[in-house]
Image: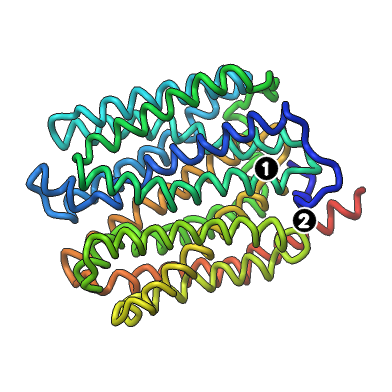
Amino acid sequence: MAQSVERAGSREGMSATQWLPLVGMTFLAFVFNTSEFMPVGLLTNIAESFSLSEAAAGIMISVYAWGVMLLSLPLMVAASRFSFKPLLLGVVALFVAGQACSAIAPTFELLTIARLLVAAAHAVFWAIAPVMATRIAGTRHAALALSMIATGTSIASVAGMPLGRAIGLALGWRMTFGCVGVIAAVLLVYQAMVFPQLPAGEPFSLRRLPELLGNRVLVALYVVTMCLATGYYAGYGYIEPFLGQIGGFDAATTTLLLTVFGAAGFVASFLFARFFDGHRYHFVGTMIVGFTAMLFSLQAAAASLATTLAVCLLWGICGTAFNIALQAMLMDAAPEDDATVAMAIYSGLFNFGIGTGTAIGGVVVSSITLSAIGYAGGAIALAGVVLAIGWLFRLDRAARAARAGRE
């Protein structure tokens, strides 16, 4: 979207026809993110049920993320021919099927394949969700719409992943996947009733891809995203065993810390809606420097509950905020008709970072030590910080100035 995302605090409120589907999108963001990160909170349990090491079970997280990476662009190119409502309903239906298959998978290999069904749904959902939300809300309320989607993500971390972990510990990890599938099925029916008819944009042809990738701001944003996401998940992918084995925290305390990590996302959503529009570069810079610093601090902070709590809180705020902010910058820089495909590439590359970061974390855990995951992640994220401040921000300033001069 060529228009800048405007501040959420508008004088004019949204109508019920806007609020109702946005609430549904918020809850869908909750279930999609709960599903994506459930294996992080249940990694030890899943590994034990299949007699695997945690590093071996962590491959499932990498395969899921790489699946999203590979599927995002081709699926979104194919999906660009459909209007948004049937596309959304089809994606959620596929998600429900993937959850059901995950819940009954008898082997680790079949569980990984079932997760790939969910990854296919994920690939399209996160390409269309921010675009659909802003189109439902309108330009005036775009920041509020994006912060609602981010709130759903935060709720997933606050309630979804810890609750899924609690269900998994009490009843088995399979029940967690089954519960998420049931919730998604209810939301499928809800959105079928309230979601408006949004026309599709012009179908995207791969012949337009070189033109899209000729946008220097988007290219810089994609490179920065890969570095930051890789560094982030080199640490986060193994946070559950880190808290238990390095921090020495019991299962209940680990669940509490993961809940704090997710609750920080609410703060991030507020900060984004309040500060991004007028201070985008200071805001993004502060967030990416912040979570990089938390990665480097991870081992030292594990010495006490108070310092670990502080790191989880700040890491959660900065991690959620930078992701929302980069999506807002993307929609500002991308042509409106190409926004979903541009977002699909972003989602794919972000998941490249998730998969690669988790794989790197697995190598560190297996070959070096679990306590070093923060240093490995911080070093990679630091490269993203340098590229963002020295390259992305400069290009984005120039592009915004050029657009302002044409208006």
Place residue 12 in its image quadrant: top right
289 to 187, vertically: above or below = below
Position of 293 compared to 99: left or right? right
Position of 398 compared to 183: left or right? right
Mark 2 against mark 1, which lies toward the viewer? Answer: 1
Residue type highlighted by circle 2: Ala
**What number is the disc on residue 314?**
none
Label 1: which residue?
A: 145
201 to 173, vertically: above or below = above
Nearer to me, 276 or 188 = 188
Residue at image position (20%, 45%) is 170
Nearer to me, 27 or 150 = 27
User: Are the two marked residues, 2 and 1, in contact with CB atoms closer than 8 angstroms?
Assistant: no
Residue type highlighted by circle 1: Ala
Where does residue 167 sit, x and y in percent of width and height? 27, 43
Alpha-carbon span between mark 2 and mark 1:
24 Å
Label 2: which residue?
A: 399
Where does residue 113 sit, x and y in percent of width and height? 25, 31
